[in-house]
Image: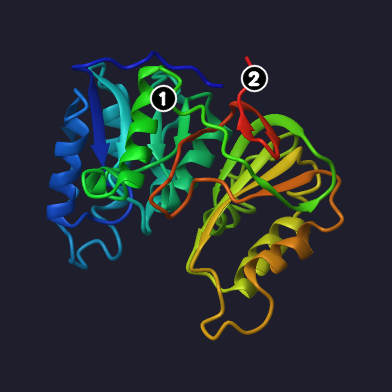
Amino acid sequence: MRVFESLKAGDVIGVIALSAACEPGRFDRGIRALESYGFRTKVVLDPAEYYGSKAFLFSSAAAIDRAEGLSDLYRDSEVRAILAARGAYGCMEILPHLDFKELSKHPKPLIGFSDVTALLLALYHRTELPLIHGPTLESTFSKSSLDPEYQKSAESLVGLLRGDGAHDRATPLRLISGNGNESLGPLIGGNLTLVTSLLGSEWDPSFDGHILFLEEIGEQPYRVHRELLKLKLAGKLSGLRGVLLGQFTACEHAKKLGPTCEEAIQDIFKDCNYPVYGFGEFGHVAANLPLCLGQIARLSPRGVEYPE
């Protein structure tokens, strides 16, 4: 695991909309919820200012401004961790504007998922920074007082940041495809569509020797199959230690016709020499528990465990 100093009460978490703008009410609720855990917050570029606007097409601000805002949070010695305000679309736009060498000097965790997958993988490839695939401010913290599952996600992330081990929860898994029983290796992955979006780019990391974790939302089974097939044809699946599937939310044919999403996944991995397990508590669901990129994990029917 790429280590970071544990956070404590009064520490500052930086918040930035790396992709789309936030709905103002949800953003404000998210900030209040995050601060209720004893943290202070520092927000850059007003994530809600351009909500519903076409000023920056699909995004919350110009790509170069978002990149500079992120860099400012990394350089700010008061900021101890950085939390994405939300996902949606647009994070890939900032990659050409980042100075990865400069960011590497500031080992603080970055947290996000969905569209933020692109940034997590790019940073994993180009730096040794600690990176957490986990809840965003709007996806979880804005709802944590309304639903116990969202609260569970928020508390799991807070526990991880505080170093109290609260994220180490093994939820039983089911063997979906592949061969073998247990696997051991560092974690890498994120949203399937964003993982494939980096193929062939300078920010595309190697998956060899890793356990690849994947989640998705709103894609029909044939599209899930197509994205996985891209990875297979590119040779990205041949050197894996294992695969951990999260939630594939609303990934079904509108009329329930044809192969299911699970059957599409099984077809891709049917001849692999490592286990493919599902379906873990992460993704576009209320129970979106954090996963640390680079952390050594053991994958088995017992769940995801972290050996000492």
**For the image shown, how many numbered marks are present on the structure?**
2
As measured in the structure, the alpha-carbon distance from the residue carrying label 2 to the one carrying label 1 is 16 Å
Expressed as whole percent of the image width and height from the top left, the position of residue 249 reads 49, 62
Tell whether 97 sits left or right of 61.
right
Of the residues shown, which amino acid type is indicated by label 2? Answer: Pro
Mark toward the start of the polypeptide (2 vs 1): 1
Question: 119 or 161, which is in the foreground?
Answer: 161
Residue 251 visible: yes
Question: 4 or 168, which is in the foreground?
Answer: 168
Taking 186 as reference, is 273 above or below it?
below
Tell whether 129 sits left or right of 173.
left
Residue 44 visible: no
Using a 10 Å C-alpha cutoff, classify the residue at mark 1 as few (fewer than 14 neighbours), some (14 to 19) or many (20 or more): some
Taking 58 as reference, is 180 above or below it?
above
CB contact under 8 Å: marks 2 and 1: no
Residue identified by numbered label 2: 307
* Kind of element beneath mark 2: loop
Expressed as whole percent of the image width and height from the top left, the position of residue 99 reads 42, 32
Q: At 38% from the left edge and 32% from the top edge, which residue is drawn?
A: 157
Taking 96 as reference, is 295 above or below it?
above
Using a 10 Å C-alpha cutoff, classify the residue at mark 2 as few (fewer than 14 neighbours), some (14 to 19) or many (20 or more): few
Expressed as whole percent of the image width and height from the top left, the position of residue 104 reads 45, 23
Choose top left, top right, bottom left or bottom right for residue 182.
top right
Residue identified by numbered label 1: 160
Q: At 78% from the left edge and 65% from the top edge, which residue is drawn?
A: 267
Rendered-image quadrant of the C terminus: top right
Q: At 47% from the left edge and 51% from the top edge, which residue is drawn?
A: 283
